[in-house]
Every structure is written in C-alpha cells, then in structure tokens.
Amino acid sequence: MATAKVTIKKGREKPIRNRHPWIFSGAVSTAANAVDGRLVTVVDYKDRFLARGYWNSKSQIQARILTWEDEAIDDAWWQRMLSRAWQSRAQYVADAGIPDSRACRVVNAENDYMPGLVLDRYGDCFVLQAQTLFIDRHKKKIADILQSHFDAEQVFERSDMDLRRQEGLHPSVGPLVGGPPPERFVLNEGALFHVDIVRGHKTGFYLDQRRNRQKLHDLVQSSASARDIDGPPSLLNLFSYSGGFAIAAQRDSDLRAVNVDSSRAALELAEKNFALNEYDKPSSAASAEHIQADSFDYLRFCVGEGARFDYVVLDPPKFARHKRQVARAARGYKDLNLNAFRLVKEGGYMMTFSCSGAISRDLFQKIVFAALADAGRQAQIVEQLSAAPDHPVALTFPEGQYLKGLLLRVY
C-alpha cells in the first residue's frame, strides 16, 4: 500500500473524480514522502481518498492514476488488469475476421488504465514499451506475468521513445524474457508485411493503421470499374515507411504506387514487402517506385511537374507533442494538405492523418478545410478515420485518441 500522499488543491479535484488519469503539477498542493517512480495515494484538501497512482516530480504530469479504488497495486492487480486487456483483444480479433490474429495491441497505456505501458503482440513475442519511470521499474514483473499467464515465449523491450527523456530515462532495448525476438516475422493482413521488431518504427509496425489499410484496399477495388481508361490507377504514398498503404492497395490490383520516405532503411523494407507479395513478378500488373526524399519537398516537386494521382495518402509522424507546438504543427499540416489537394485527380481520393495527440479532431478538420480552400478545390468527407479497435480510447481520456484522419473525395 502506498504510504506517500499527494494532496490536491481545493477546487482542482474534479478531473480526478471524473477519472482522468493525469495530474499536472499545478493541481498539487503537497506531496508528502513522494518518491519518483513510486506509488502515491491521492487525496483531496480534506484528506479524502481520490485515487492511487505513481509519482515523478521530473515530469509535467507529476502523477498518473492506476486506480480510483482504495486497493493494493500488487502482482494480483497486474495480472487482473493484463487479463482484462487481453480478453478484450481476443474478442476484437474474433469479431474482426483478421487474417493474422497473432498480431495486435494488447495494452494501450492510459486507455487500458495502465498509464505508461504499451504492449503489442507479434506471434509468441510480446513487445513492451515502458514510457515512464514507474513502468520501467516494474517491466520485469510485467514480463514475468506475460510468460507465466499468457504463454509468451519472448518479451522484448522497445523503450526508445522520446517520452522517456521527460521521465529522466534513457532508451532501453533488449530481451526481458526469453531470447531475442524472431528475426523474420511476417504479418498477414491479406497482404503480407515484414515486421522488424528490433529496429522498426514503434514496436515494429503500425498496427493502429490496420483498418485504414483495409479501407484503402476496398476503395481501390470498388473504384476499379470507374477508373480512367488511360492507364492503371496511381497512388502517392507519403511518409510511406514500409509501404503499408501501398502494399494493401496493390493487392488484387494493377495499381501503380509511389512510396516516398526520407529513410533509406524504410524504403528498403517497403521493397522487401513489395517482393514478398510477389508484386515484382512478371505475372503481377502492380508496380512501385521507392523514392528517398523529404515528403514536403516531393509534394512541391510534383505540383511543379503537374503530376496527378487517383489516390494520395498523407500519414506523417507526430508534429505536436505539446500544446506549445500546436501552432507550428498546424502550419505543417496545412502545407502538406494544400499541396496534396493540388495533386488529386478530379473525383480521386485522399487519406490524410494526424497522430499528434495535441491536435484535436476538430482542429485537424479545420486545418484540412483551410488547405482545401487555398487549393481552390472541393472535397467531401467520405469517412472519419481512427485507429483500429485494438487501440481503444478511454471515454474519460480524450487525449488517447491520438490518431485521427479523413477519407476525402476530391473535385
């Protein structure tokens, strides 16, 4: 049981009572015996119990809540919470009809009421991200529970995200349980993808975009009869990483894709995925270019060349990590979308995303609208896009809806 006590200022307890998991420094009155990376009990100004969580004075978010019940955070608590998260994913996998059910997000941090912990599964290997000091101190315990109760052959740590620096932590990558992860894990989403667990982005793959890749595939298929007679459909895939959207779109299609990324290693992985699906065989009509370039620059180049595409996908990295970065991020998103609108053929489609938690869905849509107006085009929202269902969002934690997107038909 936590002996340290964090007292909340009078009038600042409402978000906690409403079960928001973050407590910022401005809401804290006192922190008696609180030690960084250790449990604390949170009380109101009358010393009434509010929640139990963990503390880090080095972070702007000084306390993160684990439970709003007066209960122990022990091995049994961890096992119960991990089991609950796992069971919810098992139902999702069963309902979604995913070709490869061996890969999914198992724990989505605050959204699964385990702040600071991200856990993805690739076959028998679980990949763990410890984003905070408290989780870092408990990662071996979590790994042992995964081995003993979830039959994990390996638990591999990929704690190399920027967030750790705010917690006073250095990157940490390596095995926690078992040996190293499989050198070659191939994910089947209908299309096949190499997953680089050790060196790839995030935990090795963008599992959150699984449903949106399928949507693009379905859109290409449904649009096949209406496409231009002057050649195969074309896709510009910007910030392409391992070519996920292009590979999905090219399944059962003669689509011509252009993948653009600033990383040579990412493009080499995209080329491997193209070959893995045998799109490079003479029997395949699909084709792909893999171009190493800054996506902003390449967009401007295409505009200057008068290029046009049936489909454009914009899936940039996070532009805004904090509210103070929102204005600059908004300018970046507008620039990207402005030039992208200029490249879409009449009646073509654009998928545009933001994964910046500090950019709300409403603000993102306003930014895209401003870009559309400046481009002198018209567009319809065909669908609002978000992360796959194995990335749930806690209703009391709207910040958890980091991925937001729009599927647009452009005129």
Image: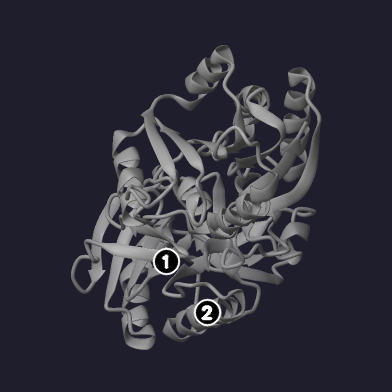
**In the foreground, 192 or 73:** 192
Q: Element type at marker 1?
A: strand
Q: Quadrant of the image for the C terminus?
A: top right
Q: Element type at marker 2?
A: helix
- Residue 289's place in the image compared with 281, above or below, is above
Q: Position of residue 30 (x, y in %)?
A: 60, 54
- Residue 274's place in the image compared with 43, above or below, is above
Distance, label 1 to label 2, CA atoms, is 28 Å
How many marks the image carries: the answer is 2
Q: Which residue is mark 2?
A: 81
**In the foreground, 45 or 173:** 173
Q: Amino acid at mark 2?
A: Met
Q: Residue at x 71, y 62 (%)?
A: 16
Q: Position of residue 105 (x, y in %)?
A: 49, 67
- Residue 339's place in the image compared with 209, above or below, is above
274 vs 318, left or right, is left
341 vs 77, left or right, is right
**In the foreground, 165 or 60:** 165
What numbered label is drawn on residue 188?
Answer: 1
Q: Amino acid at mark 1?
A: Asn
Q: Position of residue 163 (x, y in %)?
A: 45, 46
What numbered label is drawn on residue 120?
Answer: none
Q: Residue extending furthest left?
A: 179
Q: Is residue 4 visible?
A: no
Work out whether mark 1 precedes mark 2 in sequence or the reverse, and give the earlier one: 2
